[in-house]
Image (cartoon, coloured by chain):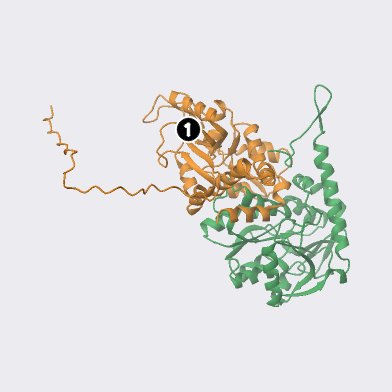
Amino acid sequence: MDVLGNYKSAISARSTDKDILKKAQDGGIITTLFAYALEEGIIDGAIVAGPSNEPWKPEPMVATTKAELLAAAGTRYTISPNLYLIKEATRSYGLDRVGIVGTPCQIQAVRKAQLYPIGMRDVDDKIALALGIYCMENLSYQALEAMVEDHCNQKMESVKKMDIGKGKFTVYTERGAVSQMPLKLIHKYVQPGCHVCLDYVANLADISSGSVGSPDGWSTVFVRSTKGNAVWDGAIKAGCFETKPMDQVKPGLDLVRKLATEKITKNQKNVDARKTVGLKADGTPKGLRNPYESP
Amino acid sequence: MKPAASKPQAKPAVKPTDVIVEKKVEVVQKEEKPVAEKITIGELHLSGCTGCLVTLADNYEGLFKLLDDYADLVYALTLVDVRHVPEMDVCLVEGSCCLDDKLSVEELKEARAKSKVLVAYGACAAYGNITRFCRGGQWNQPGQEAFVPISEVVDVDLYIPSCPPCPQEVRNVAVMAYLLLRGNDEQKNLATAYLTPLMQLAQRGNEACGCDLMYDVINQGLCMGCGTCAGTCPVRAVTMEYGRPNVNRDLCIKCGACYSQCPRSWFNFDVMNNYEGIMDAIKGAMQ
């Protein structure tokens, strides 16, 4: 598979909903798609990263209204274990059509839950829309705290927006301060599990989206599956998005491909290095577990 | 002494002579087989709660479709009137094996000898599950206390963990087993790729616990906090705290669901990348 996965179309897009754009990280693609899908009855609810009682710490939630979606809009650069709620949504909430948003690894988990529903009773046919977000790596909450409070010298609760782009991690506060740190410095905080990840643009999602490749305030969208294609076409017809062809925007698809290749090449090396990290008594290398080979 | 009840009088089996005996119309319904050759599946019930068997039935009309087109159920408690373990292609074994019950041991060995593929169906057969906690002294067999996963007694080809396993998973395995045994080359390859990780699980061992998330995922530097383990745990023993699973070991029943469902226990790109095609194929097969 290509580093960008299979896709039917790649588009640069931005939501036409002003309320969503105010809250969105970039083009408001995920929030708008879920709002449209809720409105049309394509989904009964969506598992999203909602607010919690700690600043910038997401808590997975099942959103069934646009207001709840808006409360969950925007990126928080830490872990939201959205799969936690998958049976909660399908069984406790009794939703027949569930939307879920996730990082590439979480979308992988969704597909594994559908193809191998070992402990995922009655889930496989209830995933109506799986939306993926591009992800280079993720951070524990404590790591994010260290970056914001130690490196950027801002209080978590005073932050209005966080952003990663152009080689920098940027924090905008409520009172207008802007603090930055170079991305290079955050590498030591990246959770180890991300170093073996071989997916950048959520290859297995129905539709995936992220800022890379499109101008500020816009997102690059990959429409992948038959299901995703139908939803995207419907949303375009309903006027949910402004769009531009990818070959007419800067920096364009080449940058997405470059970053995807970098991530996957680096992490494939990590996966390979795990095979020879140790030493056996006979002098041959001893390896760590490789999830891509066997359990 | 009870008073001896008078025996009911048997009616004479003599036909009155004036009854006209018409030639009996042959009404033996021959089962229509749209598919040339079905596979045969049986379910051997050992020390389990019957939840796994019920799970098979929880496919509802899907079970009928399976039995119509792909598999004959040749042996199963309450569902099939067959007393002795027959020859079969796939044997699903439910429950752990009680070593104090000689019949269980004998039947398990017989099932192994008479089946092509022996499946540990459900957590008790695969990992012992809740029977791992048995210490004997229970009604109504206080003397039975030694329960082991079936792989302690026989070789096992494939695991379907979780308590209970999910109807959709046993359905998928049944369809794949059909493709493996009766399909063309392409279908055989798909089925082999699909079943491989479940066969590898059987090779991995017969101990499971929420601790596997610590030992084989987090300690190995592989966890990325997706929440699958917490979502899949049938007894809600796993919660997510700051992006990592936290296992309440007093609640854990050792069913193996969390680890086998974890995308970082195994993730086979050759199958997963084709998820849309495979899901459509299974859906198509069940229509």
Whole-percent x and y of residue B130? 50, 36
**Observer-nearest residue: A164 or A43?**
A43
**Observer-nearest residue: B4 or B122?**
B4
Identified at 36% across, 48% down, the residue is: B26
Whole-percent x and y of residue B265? 68, 41
Q: Which chain is orange?
A: B
Whole-percent x and y of residue B12? 16, 38
Left or right: where does residue A236 sit relative to residue A98?
right
Left or right: where does residue A94 sit relative to residue A173?
left
**Observer-nearest residue: B258 or B92?**
B92
Left or right: where does residue A224 sit relative to residue A128?
right
Query: To which residue does mark 1 refer?
Result: B86
Asked if residue B17 is positioned above or below residue A252 in the image, the reply reads above
Left or right: where does residue B277 sit relative to residue A284?
left
Q: Chain of mark 1?
A: B
**Observer-nearest residue: B267 or B15?**
B15
Whole-percent x and y of residue A78? 72, 55
Identified at 69% across, 46% down, the residue is: B186
Residue furthest top in the image: A282
For mark 1, give the secondary structure.
loop
Say which quarter of the image contains residue A169: bottom right
- What kind of residue is marked 1? Pro
Identified at 64% across, 36% down, the residue is: B199
Asked if residue B153 is positioned above or below residue A56 in the image, the reply reads above
Q: Colour of chain A?
A: green
Q: For the C terminus of chain B, which image quadrant?
A: bottom right
